[in-house]
Amino acid sequence: MRIERFIGIDLAWAQSGARTQPNETGVAAIDAHGVVIECGWTRGLDETMSWLARAAVDGSTLAFVDAPLVVDNPAGQRPCEREVGRRYGRWKVSEQYQPELSPTGRSAAAGTAGGVGLVL
């Protein structure tokens, strides 16, 4: 199988809750030659899945997803995470330490959306 489309998705940290709208998720698609087909933002899982369904080429798309993780770390941020925040925080790039969250309170979604099969 030849890969015709490469997709990158950087999922937003907050999808719901007290916010009026979810944070932005970064999305990008390039073709087999490295040409950018589309690059932008989506909000919420439904909008992101719709974008993925439109951007994917049936049977020949490879998608990379950077998703937030919840790590139960009572000691707080590791030195490397603090350094990333110090250097790149002004661009909203940093580790989001939230001790009130528990790994058992999160779930991963797997399924099919708009004809795009997902395995997480």
Image (cartoon, grey):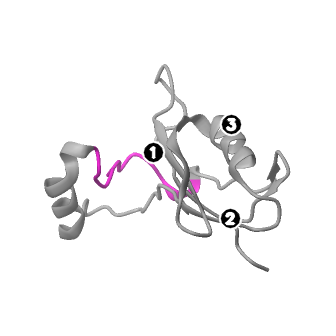
Q: Residue at x 46, y 57 (%)?
A: 70
Q: Amino acid at mark 1?
A: Trp
Dot 1 falls on a residue whose secondary structure is: loop
First in sequence: mark 1 vs mark 2 = 1
- Residue 64 vs residue 19: left or right? right
Dot 3 falls on a residue whose secondary structure is: helix
Q: Which residues are magenta?
A: 92-104
Label 2 and label 3: CA atoms lie apart by 16 Å
| Residue that numbered label 1 is attached to | 13
Instruction: Specify whether residue 105 is painted magenta.
Output: no
Q: Work out whether residue 62 or residue 112 is closer to the camera in this orientation and state it.
A: 62
Q: Which mark is residue 120?
A: 2
- Where 59 falls versus 38 (above or below)? below
Q: Magenta stretch: dominant SS?
A: loop
| Location of residue 95 by image quarter | bottom left
- Residue 83 vs residue 93: left or right? left
- Residue 66 vs residue 81: left or right? right
Q: Residue at x 50, y 31 (%)?
A: 22
Label 1 and label 2: CA atoms lie apart by 17 Å
| Residue that numbered label 3 is attached to | 46
Q: Amino acid at mark 2?
A: Leu
The C terminus appears in which quarter of the rendering? bottom right
- Where 100 falls versus 36 (above or below)? above
| Location of residue 56 by image quarter | bottom right
Q: Work out whether residue 16 or residue 23 is closer to the camera in this orientation and state it.
A: 23
Label 3 and label 1: CA atoms lie apart by 15 Å
Percent x, y of residue 36:
52, 55
Q: Amino acid at mark 3?
A: Asp
Q: Residue at x 69, y 44 (%)?
A: 49
Crowding at dot 3, Cα within 10 Å, few <14 / some 14-19 / many 20+, comes out as: few
